[in-house]
Amino acid sequence: MSIKEFLDNYKNSFDKRSKAFIEECISYGMTEKEAKRYAKQKIFPGSIVDKIPTLDTSIYQTVTPQLKDRFLYAGSWKEIGETFLSIDAMIKLANKPKFKKWVKSMRENWEDSAPWIYLDKQLSVISVMSEDEGDYTLAVWNNPVEPEIWRYSGQSEQKFKDLLGWLNWLNGN
């Protein structure tokens, strides 16, 4: 499957994922009306992207075929608990003191994490689940063909071979 097909599947499964999210929120005591306020999807227009900013915002990586297709599909994408960042949002987040503190903490305390192993010029933040909780997805530029995707949520780390692998996982496969 192509990046576009994976993104189409993810977009088209929103209603199903939204219903599950609302049911979970209700089970924790939230009203249906409150839960529905958070169960929204907004996809912003895509564009041609040539370079991807790294955590060292003076250095960019050349866009790869998979990331090129992702940015052609959507500039940014916000829904339920995930935001796929636009290029501008990637730069903005990389410059935020709270995010820099997260990277520093990972670098100093989480052995074998992406920030522990790689330099800022080899890392790009591509999605955010929660800035408050420090839940991010990083592109790790350790492969000349496509970057690996490393996801951090709570105390868990997941690694994917590339963007296709991550999107396949997001689609429940």
Image (spheres, grey):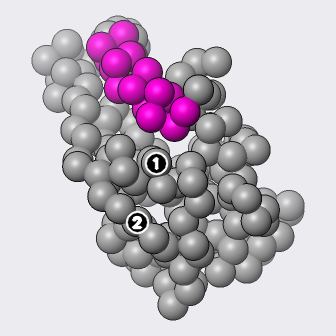
Would you say the magenta stretch is mainly helix, strand or loop?
A: helix
Q: Which mark is residue 87?
A: none
The answer to whether residue 56 is above or below residue 68 is: below
Q: Residue at x 33, y 70 (%)?
A: 88
Front in this rendered view, residue 126 or 47 = 47
Residues in magenta, as a range: 2-18
Disc 1 residue type? Asp
Disc 2 residue type? Val
Q: Taking 127 as reference, is 30 left or right? A: left
Q: Residue at x 39, y 26 (%)?
A: 8
9 part of magenta stretch: yes
Q: Which mark is residue 69?
A: 1
Q: Residue at x 82, y 70 (%)?
A: 117
> How many labels sit on residues?
2
6 part of magenta stretch: yes
Front in this rendered view, residue 17 or 52 = 52
State which quadrant residue 36 falls in. Answer: top left
Residue 68 placement (x, y as % from top left): 48, 56
Judging by the rendered image, the residue that carries numbered circle 2 is 49
The answer to whether residue 155 is above or below residue 171 is: below
- Look at the numbered discs 2 and 1 and tell me whether their residues touch, using CB distance below 8 Å: no
Q: Residue at x 22, y 38 (%)?
A: 42
Residue 7 placement (x, y as % from top left): 43, 32
Q: Taking 111 as reference, is 104 left or right? A: left
State which quadrant residue 95 falls in. Answer: bottom left
Can residue 105 be seen in the rendering of this structure?
Answer: no
Quadrant of the frame with the N terminus: top right
Q: Taking 18 as reference, is 153 left or right? A: right
Residue 22 placement (x, y as % from top left): 31, 15
Mark 1: few/some/many CA within 10 Å (<14, 14-19, 20+): some
